[in-house]
Image (cartoon, grey):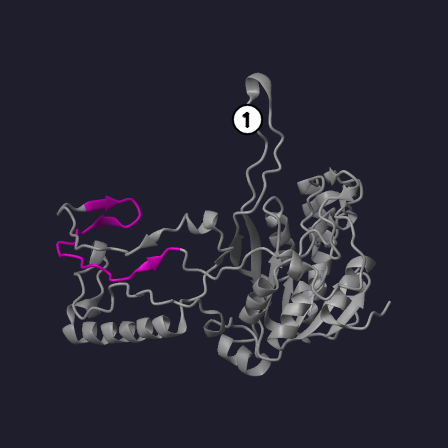
Amino acid sequence: MKLLHGDNLALLATLPDNSIDAVATDPPYGLGEAPDALAMLRDWLETGHHDVKSKRGFMGKMWDNFVPQPVQWHEVYRVLKPGGHVLAFAGTRTQDLMALGIRLAGFEIRDLVAWVYGSGFPKSHNLEGELEGYGTALKPALEPITLARKPLEGTVVANMLKWHTGAINVDGCRVPANGDKLGGGAEKDVQSDKPEGWDRPWRNNPEAQRAHAERIRENVQKAEAAGRWPANLIHDGSDEVVGLFPYSKGQISASRSDGTDKTNIVYGKMRHNPEVMQPRGDSGSAARFFYCAKVSPSERNAGLSDLPDKEWKGDGAAIPQRGERPFNPSKNNHPTVKPIALMRYLCRLITPPGGTVLDPWMGSGSTGVACKEEGFQFIGMEQDEGYYVIACHRMNVEIEM
C-alpha cells in the first residue's frame, strides 16, 4: 500500500510509464456552476485544461468544483499499461463531461455501469401556491460508472500474454444463480424455424442444430454452477429497487406468429415464422445482478477510533443541525464514501491477480481497503489532508506528509 498526499498531477508525474494495471476511482463530480461548454471544449482540445469560474461543488467543497480534466487523464493514460481498464464514478449531471475528459485523453469508452439504489433523497426546489406539485429535480437513484480501456497492443490475447491486461475478469465476478434456471430456449435440440426471416443455413441441418444445442446446454450448466455473467447494472438490494424486478418464469407457454408478413423499413419484407416457439424454461427474479448496499456507519468509521468526531459540513454548505449536536457526527466526514464490497467487486473485475490498482482521487480510502482485502497492490493519491489521514488510518498505513 502506497498512500501519497498532494496534487495528483504532480504525483502522477513520479510514476513510470505502463506501470499500473487498473484504475478504480471516485473522482470529483464537478457539481458546481456549469461551465461554458464551447469555451471548455476549445480549451480541452488545445491544452487539456479549462479554468472554471465555479469555486465550490457538492456540499460547498472546493475540490468538487469541476470534473477531472484531460490533462489529468493524460497522465493516468501514460502510467496505465496497454489494455488497462479505468472505472470512474460520476454524477448524473456531469457524466458526459467525465466521459469526454477520459475519451479525449486517448481512452476507449467500453461501457457504463449503473449503481442503482433506493436511498436517494430528491434535492428539489418545490414550488408553492398555484404551482404546487412542481419541482426542479428528480430523486437520485443511480450513479454512473464509466468503464474505459487504454488501447491494446495487438490482439486481446497478445496484450494479455504480455501485459496481463485488456480483458475483464468474468468468472471472478459472476453473480450466484441461487438455484434459478438459466436456460434461454436455444438449448433445445429442435429449434423454431428461421425467426423473423433471419435465414441461418445451419438451422436446416438437424445435426448442426443438435451440436448448437449441446454447446448452449454446456454454457447454461456452467452459468447455473458458476453464476450469471456480470452485468452493467449493480443494485443496492433495497426493497425499493428489488421490488421493481419481480420474480419471473420467462416465457411460460408456446407461441406462434399470426401468419402475416411484416414489412420493416430497415430490413425490407420479412417472412413470418409459422413454427411454434417453445417456452425458454428460465426462471428467477429479474434482479439478477450483483448487489451492494450503501456504506454503513460502522464500515465508514472502521479503524478510526483514535480520530475525533467531525461535522459533515462543507465550506458554506447548508447542513441541518440538531440543537447543539452537529448533524450525523462521524470520524470519517468524507461526503461520498463508497462501500468496500462494491469497490472489491469493481477492482476484481478489471485487475489481474496481484496487480496494482491506482486511485488518483483516493478520498477516505475505500478503494485501498478493497484492494488490501482482494490481495492487490494499491497506490492512492489525495490532496485533502484530512481525508488523507483518514485513509491512512483505515488502511493502517504510516502517515507521510
- Residue positioned most to the bottom: 161
Residue at 68% across / 56% down in the picture? 27
Eyeballing the image, is 307 above or below 160? above
Quadrant assignment for the C terminus: bottom right
Residue at 77% across / 43% down in the picture? 325
Dot 1, how many residues are within 10 Å of its Cα: few (below 14), some (14-19), or many (20+)?
few
In the image: residue 51, left or right of residue 348: right
The residue range painted magenta reads 262-286
Eyeballing the image, is 336 above or below 8? above
Quadrant assignment for the N terminus: bottom right
What's the magenta bit mostly, secondary-structure-wise? loop
Give x and y (percent) for residue 335: 70, 51
Which quadrant holds residue 187? bottom left
Give x and y (percent) for residue 301: 70, 60
Q: Amino acid at mark 1?
A: Tyr
Give x and y (percent) for residue 178: 38, 67
Which quadrant holds residue 7? bottom right
The answer to whether one can see residue 21 in this image is no
In the image: residue 356, left or right of residue 168: right
Give x and y (percent) for residue 38: 67, 41
In the image: residue 271, left or right of residue 378: left
Of 70 and 182, which appears nearest the observer?
182
The answer to whether one can see residue 323 in this image is yes
The reply to whether the magenta stretch includes residue 23 is: no
Eyeballing the image, is 165 above or below 112? below
Of 340 and 108, which appears nearest the observer?
340
In the image: residue 274, left or right of residue 288: left
User: Tag 1, which secondary structure?
Assistant: loop
Residue bearing mark 1: 134
The reply to whether the magenta stretch includes residue 274 is: yes
